Image: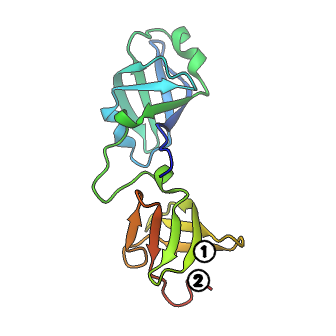
Amino acid sequence: MKEKLEFFRIGKIVKTRGLKGDIKVYSHTDDIERFLELEYFYIGKDRDIKYKVERVNIIAPNMVTIKILGYDTIESVQEFIQKYMYVDRENSYKLEDDEMFIVDMIGLKAYTEEGMYLGKLIDVLQYTTNDVYVIKSDEGKEYLIPATYEIVPEINIDENRMIIRPIKGLLE
């Protein structure tokens, strides 16, 4: 099994807001409300400093303001502008039983139900209706596989594989 990523990028600090040290953050998550439960985060590549959250306000579907505990002036947060925010796996979004992080799926080997090897998962395209898995064969051919239970009945992170039940024309 491959090593799991321990830190997830959740947003980018785009500017300050007001004079009391609030920062405006562009969200990189698919659920903006996850910021409301955020206790702490990291900035940039520094994993030694945990920035504790004092308060969060959702100001747009993809934007929040965050007040960092102990940072009370605009000058104290200006150095964070244009830097990315990260959370560790422990402080990340709590997954349901049938959910997994995309980063943990990348590299899975894809097989048909009959056992034919198709390739590796190289990307997940996220759309409103459902995600689409991008599988790349060893020969370089890419397959776009709808991420539905009917077409992908099994994903096993521990065994590093996914099973595809192709419909007619899907693999052509």
Gap between marks 1 and 2, in whole Å? 6 Å
Image point (32%, 49%), residue name: 95
Q: Are marks 1 and 2 in contact (CB under 8 Å)?
A: yes
- Residue 143 disc label: 1
Image point (51%, 37%), residue name: 9
Picture layout, residue 153 above or below residue 13: below
Question: What x and y, as percent, mark residue 33?
Answer: 34, 41
Q: Which amino acid, mark 1?
A: Tyr
Q: Is residue 123 left or right of residue 10?
A: right
Q: In terms of depth relative to the viewer, which is nearer, 69 or 118?
A: 118
Q: In terms of depth relative to the viewer, which is nearer, 143 or 17?
A: 143
Q: Which amino acid, mark 2?
A: Leu
Question: What x and y, as percent, mark residue 71?
Answer: 44, 11
- Disc 1 secondary structure class: strand
Instruction: Return the residue found at the far right.
Output: 139
Q: In terms of depth relative to the viewer, which is nearer, 116 or 15?
A: 116
Question: What x and y, as percent, mark residue 158?
Answer: 40, 57
Image point (36%, 28%), residue name: 56
**Dot 2, how many residues are within 10 Å of its Cα: few (below 14), some (14-19), or many (20+)?**
few
The residue singled out by tag 2 in the image is 171
**Dot 1, how many residues are within 10 Å of its Cα: few (below 14), some (14-19), or many (20+)?**
some
Image point (58%, 16%), residue name: 78
Picture layout, residue 138 above or below residue 97: below
Picture layout, residue 101 above or below residue 37: below
